[in-house]
Image: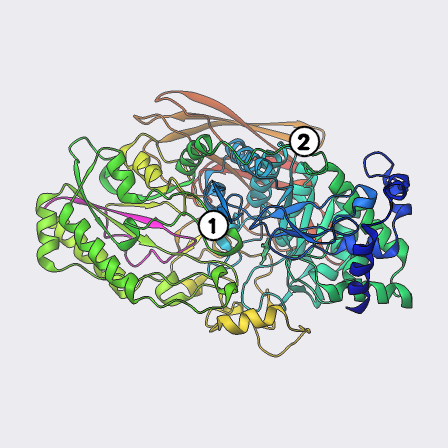
Amino acid sequence: MKSYNLLLSFAALLCFAPVSAQQQSPQLGKSSIDEVLQAMTLEEKITLLIGGEMGGKATTIGATGVTQNLVPGAAGTTHAIPRLGIPSIVLADGPAGLRIQPTRDNDPNTYYCTAFPIATLLASTWNTGLVEEVGKSIGQEVKEYGVDVLLAPALNIQRDPLCGRNFEYYSEDPFLSGKIAASMVRGIQSNGVGTSIKHFAANNQETNRMATNAVISKRALREIYLKGFEIVVREASPWTVMTAYNYINGVYASESRELLTDILRNEWGFKGLVMTDWFGGQNAAAQMYAGNDLLMPGRPYQYDEISAAIHTGTLSEKDIDTNVRRMLQLILASPRFKKYPFSNKPNLKMHATVTRQSAAEGMVLLENKQNALPLTDSIQTIAAFGTTSYDFIAGGSGAGDVYEAYTVSLVEGLSNAGYHLDKSVSNWYEQYIKEQTEKMRPMGNNPHLAFFNHPRMGEKVPQKELLEKSAETTDLAIITIGRNAGEYVDRKIENDFQLTNEEHALIQNVCQNYHKKGKKVVVILNVCGVVETASWKSLPDAILLAWQAGQEGGNTVADILKGTVNPSGKLPMTFPIQYMDTPSSTNFPYNYKADPEQIIASIFTNRGLKHEQRNVDYTEYTEDIFVGYRYFDTYNKEVSYPFGYGLSYSRFYFDNPIIRQEQDNYTISIDITNIGQVSGKEVIQLYVKAPIGSLPKPKKELKAFAKTKKLQPGEKQTISLSIKTADLASYAEDKQAWVVDSGSYLLEIGNCVADIKCSTQLIIP
Ligand code: BGC
């Protein structure tokens, strides 16, 4: 601490140094990186490697010596060294849009960002082109608000349905996660700003997230938990990678040279910068040596640790020169270095349209009995049940949250679409919501609590008379079920994964009353992740999984209900019948009681590796590679909805699969015809069944996918999917290598893991 403070006072003095002395120093951008590096003092080097504290504030060394405000609400900045022409750059969250403060002191302007759909919804589109377009829009906001690196996308595997941050992640499948994340990175970075793919790696639970040890076989690590990152690094060259908080097999992810240098850089060819997650890891010198170049948000003691390690020789100045060089490269590429004149006026109007359209492709139609949807013209008046119908959830909480100007609720969306809402039901809900809001207690005064997910109000079944009257006078009932989650805390089974007793009663009562009158009921799931559906899904006529669709949510749902958009979303994960059916469930802290104050305290305390409390101090990934459908499908375990599942208002015919080989590349073409009555899109999923070989394999593994264009009734499109021999490999731990067994591989093509339409074979000699 002492030397850091000394440095700062010395630096403050430096700002009075004669201008000519500054002019003689090499300047970043004008001189080569090596020249700048050579001119840097050890103090300057270390200072550059630790961030500039939280909140968009940068401590400027050598210039004004004071803290500057760059972009309020950003997650962090780096240190500037004006003597060498090195500016601070700004890093901000997060996956569903840019997260900055929407208003500023003494400033009448607003700085709202667009709340785009959550990552899980985007993965449910299975549309890489569309996700790239969303990325372009997000990147434009990043650039126009003066931010250099967006701390996104997040692509940890949805190993367990209860992980609190699953909404920020894409899928239980690494291939889908990797392809969608690569598109997002390409889109964002096309603006000339950076991304930070996170959290590298195996950050699959929030419980004790800063010190939990993920115990994983090398094979599962490679095939499941690293694969998505590998795809993004190889295909989209993200500017930066953010390391995970957790330990992996006893080593902090941010301190693992094997992970950050041997695998990420030497094997995959990553050329960018690695930064920690905020306050992550323990030993600053070990982080530097591992190849974790930037410590965020930057703590004074980290300066001392690195300095001491260099003085005692456990770390060499040459080691940190490598880290510094990467910092300089990143800064050189940044809009701030290029003095980009950001406008603070991104195209929010256009991005609202992008949000509405992209969300429509990721909503998943789970049930549609007797074509309850799309609504016919005879449906004019609708009764909206469930508090969430009136208070739609745009996205999750914590770093993944966005400050948007508005969120269109379901009732607003319905009335924008021309439907009349039943006044007595709406009035009842408005009154109930008002009463409940007054009763809800704030979580506490600690500012960190703002990051936590706040409990939602419970449901109540409206009285019998009101239900009878609305069933009599309206044409349709809609019930919205809401769920939210976020950083720090994992979800629970009761009253979270499972519906509450009141929610069950609401669905039962509304269905009973409406069905008695021959009228239909639609359930909308405005949720952050998987919920239990098996026990109640037979009751309503249709179920639309709307996810958290961003700020235009209510309009998007109305687009689908009305049939303006034909749903084409497919599940990026399995919906189990019960939570305990999930292969990870016995090795997940599903019954851990989190204390928010204790969690906050743990961020700043010393965290050692412990092996006391199972699933808290350490979590054994005993399911190995059999995550999600790899388990359910292989072991014929019944599910509520399988991976890849989703209905359409149309039907599609899969025909004529042809396989062509060109050396190590295989192209599989297939004809898809819309044989329904309305236009729509279909997702084509290619699964591979490997021959019996040296390692146990799942029954099917997703190896390619594509989405058709919008096909008119009767229209046909030939879709081409390609795979390489290397895509068929498994990681053999004994050989420490990827191995492709010879034999006959069955290629199965369908629109869901459980609905294979046709197949073909390829032989690997
Ligand atoms: C989260 C990261 C985020 C960072 C900065 C951390 O708490 O885990 O995902 O980017 O904060 O806000």
Mark 1 within 8 Å of ligand 1, using the beta carbon:
no
Which residue occupies the foreground of this view, 435 or 598? 435
Q: Amino acid at mark 2?
A: Asn
Q: What colour-coding does the image apply?
A: rainbow
Q: What is the number of callouts on the image?
A: 2
Tell me if I can see residue 291 in this picture. Answer: no
CA–CA distance in space, label 1 to label 2: 28 Å
**Image coordinates for residue 635, horizontal then vertical, percent:** 49, 57
Seen at 14% across and 41% down, the residue is 475
**Image coordinates for residue 743, horizontal then vertical, percent:** 66, 42
Q: Is residue 525 magenta?
A: yes
**Span highlighted in magenta in the image:** 517-540
Position of the C terminus by quadrant = top right
**Image coordinates for residue 727, horizontal then vertical, percent:** 66, 41
Which residue carries the number 1 mark?
573
Tell me if I can see residue 377 in this picture. Answer: yes
Foreground mark, 1 or 2, reads 1
Q: Amino acid at mark 1?
A: Met
Which residue carries the number 2 mark?
665
